[in-house]
Image (cartoon, helix red, strand yellow):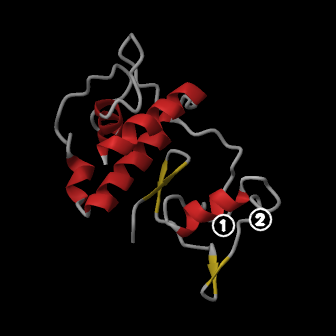
């Protein structure tokens, strides 16, 4: 089963968005103006629903979640699971994220790709919501890295 990261948690998610081979729009996405794009991202397996079948489009994306998504996307596109252990055993440059934290490797990747910048005091601040500016910078710097 694939690794799934949503809401900062590692999940072994059961796919609930397909019913009898047909795609099913999550209930909390129905009638939203961006439903078409959310459904496309789900069908392309770029994002996933939560285990209960919801998508929660209004829930903020944290720096940790964005980093974990980038790590998994790189591993999938390259077909190389070694991405998940690039920084294993290395000391943490972050004052608030130990090298044993499950999102440490992903945080290092996101910082290396300049998707997310650590705070001036060296904090990664994994639970802080990604701002609009950070989100734009993340996309701008992630795409060329692929």
Splitting the image into 4 quarters, where does residue 39 fall? Answer: bottom right
Q: Assign the N terminus to one quadrant of the image.
A: bottom left
Front label number (2 vs 1): 2
Judge whether 122 appears above or below 12 on screen: above
Judge whether 66 appears above or below 118 on screen: below
Q: Residue at x 49, y 65 (%)?
A: 45
Q: Which mark is residue 13?
A: none
**Residue at far bottom of view:** 20
Q: Residue at x 35, y 29 (%)?
A: 114
Horizontal side, residue 24 vs residue 65: left or right: right
Q: Position of residue 26 (x, y in %)?
A: 71, 65
Disc tally is 2
Q: Residue at x 31, y 49 (%)?
A: 146
Element type at mark 2: loop
**Residue 56 visible in the snapshot:** yes
Q: Mark 2 highlights which residue? A: 27
Horizontal side, residue 54 vs residue 5: left or right: right
Horizontal side, residue 130 vs residue 87: left or right: right
Crowding near pointer 2: few (<14 within 10 Å), some, many (20+)? few
Q: Position of residue 35 (x, y in %)?
A: 72, 59
Element type at mark 1: loop
**Residue at far right of view:** 31
Q: Position of residue 128 (x, y in %)?
A: 55, 28
Residues at circles 2 and 1 in contact by the CB criterion of under 8 Å: yes
Q: Mark 1 highlights which residue? A: 53
* Of the image marks 2 and 1, the number of the one nearer the N terminus: 2
The residues tagged by marks 2 and 1 sit, at their Cα atoms, a distance apart of 8 Å
- The answer to which of 17 and 12 lies nearer the viewer is 17
Splitting the image into 4 quarters, where does residue 48 fall? Answer: bottom right
């Amino acid at each position: 089963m694939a690794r799934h990261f949503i809401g900062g948690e590692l999940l072994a998610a059961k796919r609930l968005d397909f019913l009898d081979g047909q795609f099913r729009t999550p209930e909390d996405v129905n009638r939203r103006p961006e439903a078409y794009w959310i459904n496309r991202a789900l069908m392309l397996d770029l994002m996933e629903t939560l285990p209960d079948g919801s998508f929660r489009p209004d829930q903020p994306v944290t720096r940790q979640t964005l980093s974990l998504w980038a790590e998994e996307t790189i591993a999938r596109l390259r077909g190389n699971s070694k991405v998940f252990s690039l920084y294993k055993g290395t000391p943490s440059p972050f004052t608030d994220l130990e090298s044993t934290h499950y999102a440490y490797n992903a945080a290092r990747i996101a910082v290396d790709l300049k998707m997310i910048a650590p705070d001036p005091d060296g904090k990664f601040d994994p639970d802080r919501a990604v701002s609009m500016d950070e989100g734009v910078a993340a996309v701008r710097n992630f795409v060329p890295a692929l």
